[in-house]
Amino acid sequence: MALQHTRQPVVSVITPAYNAAPFIAEAIASILKQTFAEFEMIIVDDGSDDQTAEIVASFNDDRIRFGRQKRSGVAAARNHAIGLSRGLYLAFHDADDMAFPERLQKQMEYFAHHPEIGLVGGAAEVWVDRTPSGEYYRYPTEPAHLAFEMLFENYLVHSSVMLRRRVIDAVGLFTLLESRRHEDYELWSRVSRRFAMANLPDVLTIYRNHPGSVCGTTDFEANGIMLASENIAYAAGHRKVKPAHMALASLMRGHDPKIAAIQYPDLQQLLLWIAYRLARRFHAPVAQFAPRFHARQEILRHQWGRFYPLPPAKPLELSIPWRRRLAKIFRP
């Protein structure tokens, strides 16, 4: 497939592929059926030793562009594809997932009506291999709510994400560091610090969940805690990660922080402080933001109670006196 095209596409669909023969034909076909047609699909083969290249070559559509590299990992393949891309928007689509026909159209329409948004995702239907599981990933849609939840965990389905090219230009590509193996969560975290993000409530993609995924390993989760700690530190206005940030990140992800100096009220106040700062950043009314904060406060209380005795502390409320009091405690 030639890489020379005369017309610049609006959207570049980024697809890394490694030994993707079982599913890549379905992944490609779902993109070619999009109601929004002004796209290119860039597939980078990350050193496959199966029939991936032959399957890609079987599609006779000049919107498909194909590149190869030596086995370097999914992040490097995505970066390679981004380097080949020419669109003003980048849509991520993994080689084993499928997109519903109106996925690109709905996201382009959303961007047209929300110029302040740098990245938009959507809901996903979950399949196990070729079998629908009956489950769906439905994540926060409002920018302020999504930014708050993204401090602790990844609430973006990778194959539903579309972002403006200027966002990647501003924050950089996917990390290649082995010590930061949550490469998608790591990139979305960098995006969230500088741009507003949102999720559409619409189901845009079919996400395949494969048994034996690396996502459940101890090292992978430890890396997730580290990234969440950095997010919490940034949201609190602190330049470096502190023990309280690590403790809050660990508990929010269901792990014992094992930091003896941290007390439960300290983490309550830290959680409230970052909620205030995010509500202020997004000009979110307290009445709308409070339920999400209180839900996280309940998670904190539950997780603390799994590992330590719960003190007779009352839930904190979002109120002006608390904001003034916390501002004196959590100075950068």
Image (spheres, rainbow, N blue to C red):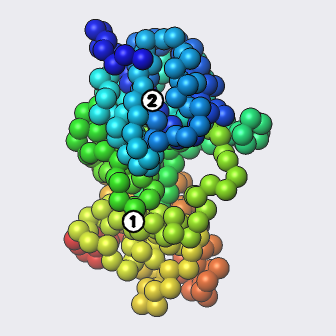
Outermost residue on the top side: it is 6
Three-letter amino acid code at disc 1?
Ser
Badge 2 or badge 1: first in the primary sequence: 2
Q: Marks 2 and 1, Cα distance to the nearest angstrom?
A: 26 Å
Q: Nearer the viewer, mark 2 or mark 1?
A: 2
Three-letter amino acid code at disc 2?
Ile
Residue 154: image location, x then y, percent:
49, 52
Task: Return the mark for residue 179.
Answer: 1
| Residue 48 left/right relative to 276 | right
Circle 1: element type: helix
Circle 2: element type: strand
Task: Return the mark for residue 264.
Answer: none
The answer to whether residue 171 of the structure is visible from this angle is yes
Residue pictured at 26% horizontal, 64% vertical: 237
- The quadrant of the rendering that contains the C terminus is bottom left
Which is more toward the observer, 19 or 178?
Answer: 19
- Which residue is labeled 2 in the image? 43
| Residue 280 left/right relative to 157 | left
Which is more toward the observer, 164 or 328?
Answer: 164
Outermost residue on the front side: it is 49
The answer to whether residue 160 of the structure is visible from this angle is no
Residue pictured at 47% horizontal, 42% vertical: 47
Residue 238: image location, x then y, percent:
26, 68
**Mark 2 Cα-neighbour bin, 10 Å: few <14, some 14–19, many ≥20:** many
Residue pictured at 53% horizontal, 72% vertical: 251
Q: Quadrant of residue 254?
A: bottom right
Badges 2 and 1: C-beta atoms under 8 Å apart? no
Residue 145 vertical placement versus 101 (above, below): below
**Mark 1 Cα-neighbour bin, 10 Å: few <14, some 14–19, many ≥20:** few
- The quadrant of the rendering that contains the N terminus is top left
Residue 197: image location, x then y, percent:
39, 40
Residue 110: image location, x then y, percent:
43, 24
